[in-house]
Amino acid sequence: MQDNLKDILSHLSTEIDQETLLRYLQGKLSGDKLHEVEKILLENDFASEALEGLQQFRDKQQLNYTVEKLNRDLKKKLELKKKRRRKPELTDQSWLYITILILILLIVISYIVVNKMMH
């Protein structure tokens, strides 16, 4: 799976990358870039709502750490889900074989009994 699909903030907007958005939240963008990001945010409702949620962080310096932590957790969960899908559920199925054997034996015994009764 591509790494950019696993990033939390990568799908906010195709025009804004994650690093630019984080610098915007920390107030580290120049005037032109700041204006460009704000214009994009006005046009994209999803990105602006996500930005509002991210702005509620008290410590903007911890925002990078939080985003990285979320990305790591998401990658771990996706890897775990991927492993579960790959791993077939072939645990001890001896009970299945025993059941099939018993059914075959019952069918054979029933056939013999019916065949004897008819003669």
Image (spheres, rainbow, N blue to C red):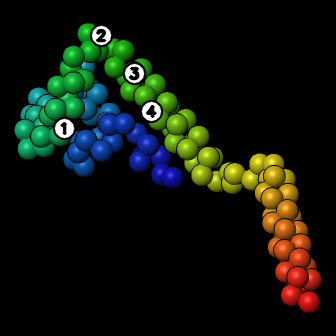
Question: Closer to the N terminus: mark 4 or mark 3?
Answer: 3
Rendered location of residue 15, percent (x, y): 21, 47
- Please state which amino acid type lies under the numbered disc 4: Asn
Q: Callout 3: 10 Å neighbours few (<14), some, many (20+)?
A: few
> In the image, what residue occupies the spot 28% across and 27% down?
22
Rendered location of residue 55, percent (x, y): 20, 20
Compare residues 110 and 32 and report the one nearer the observer: 110
**Cα gap from disc 2 to disc 1, whole angstroms:** 20 Å
Element at label 3 = helix
Mark 4 lies on residue: 71
Is the residue 30 above or below the residue 108 in the image?
above
Please state, as top left, top right, bottom left or bottom right, where the C terminus lies in the image.
bottom right
Seen as rendered, the residue at the extreme bottom is 119
Element at label 4 = helix
Element at label 2 = loop
**Cα gap from disc 3 to disc 1, whole angstroms:** 18 Å
Mark 3 lies on residue: 66
Mark 2 lies on residue: 59
Circles 2 and 1, Cβ within 8 Å, touching? The answer is no
- Please state which amino acid type lies under the numbered disc 1: Ala
The label shown at residue 82 is none
**Cα gap from disc 2 to disc 3, whole angstroms:** 10 Å
Circles 2 and 3, Cβ within 8 Å, touching? The answer is no
- Please state which amino acid type lies under the numbered disc 3: Thr
Mark 1 lies on residue: 47
Nearer to us of marks 2 and 4 is 4
